[in-house]
């Protein structure tokens, strides 16, 4: 490497492994001083390598949790929402989900259909 950088940023690169990181000066001493075992090192590598994916999924889960609180009126007529896909309107009318979160988990209902539904409901 031609320039210095934070070890987290270097380690997050796909072609850099724990073995590569252990070759950096001071890393082995840090591992020994803090009594880090093989499992801890493996978990560290997983957390660093997949941090972006983990954060994205956590955000998705948080969003679904927030949508769980938004109730859909009983016998809601989805056929009035012309900007929603035909398949989504058909499935939502048939299934009649209770919350937006339930609606978002129906196969054939896209995130854009959920956005349209939220706008239509005034959210």
Image (spheres, rainbow, N blue to C red):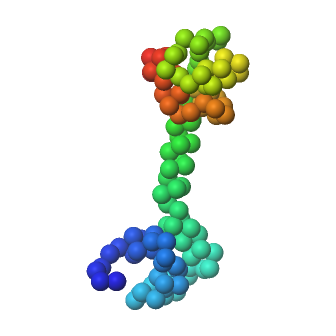
Give the answer, above or below, for where 97 lies relative to 18. Answer: above
Q: Could you tell whether 16 is left or right of 43 in the image?
A: left
Q: Is residue 90 above or below residue 63?
A: above
- The N terminus - image quarter: bottom left
Q: Nearer the viewer, residue 110 or 52?
A: 110
Residue 2 spot, x, y in % from top left? 29, 83
Residue 82 to residue 46: above or below: above
Q: x%, y% of residue 94? A: 71, 18
81 or 23: nearer the viewer? 81
Left or right for 95, reference 2? right
Identify which residue, 26 or 51, lies in the foreground. Answer: 51
Seen from the viewer's position, the closer of residues 47 and 75 is: 75
Task: Looking at this view, name the residue that lies furthest to the left.
Answer: 3
Q: Is residue 7 visible?
A: yes
Residue 3 position, x and y percent, is 28, 80
Please say if 58 is above or below 12: above
Residue located 32% across and 75% down the image: 5
- At a point 50% along the width and 45% down the height, the residue shown is 59
**Farthest residue, direction right:** 94
């Amino acid at each position: 490497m031609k320039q210095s950088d934070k070890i987290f940023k270097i380690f997050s690169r796909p072609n850099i492994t724990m073995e590569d990181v252990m070759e950096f000066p001071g890393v082995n001493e840090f591992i020994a001083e803090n009594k880090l075992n093989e499992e801890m090192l493996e978990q560290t590598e997983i957390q660093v390598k997949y941090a972006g994916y983990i954060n994205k999924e956590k955000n998705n889960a948080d969003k679904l949790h927030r949508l769980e609180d938004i109730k859909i009126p009983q016998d809601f007529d989805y056929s009035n929402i012309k900007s929603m896909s035909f398949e989504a309107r058909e499935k939502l009318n048939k299934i009649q989900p209770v919350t937006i979160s339930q609606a978002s988990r129906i196969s054939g209902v896209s995130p854009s259909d959920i956005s349209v539904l939220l706008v239509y409901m005034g959210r």
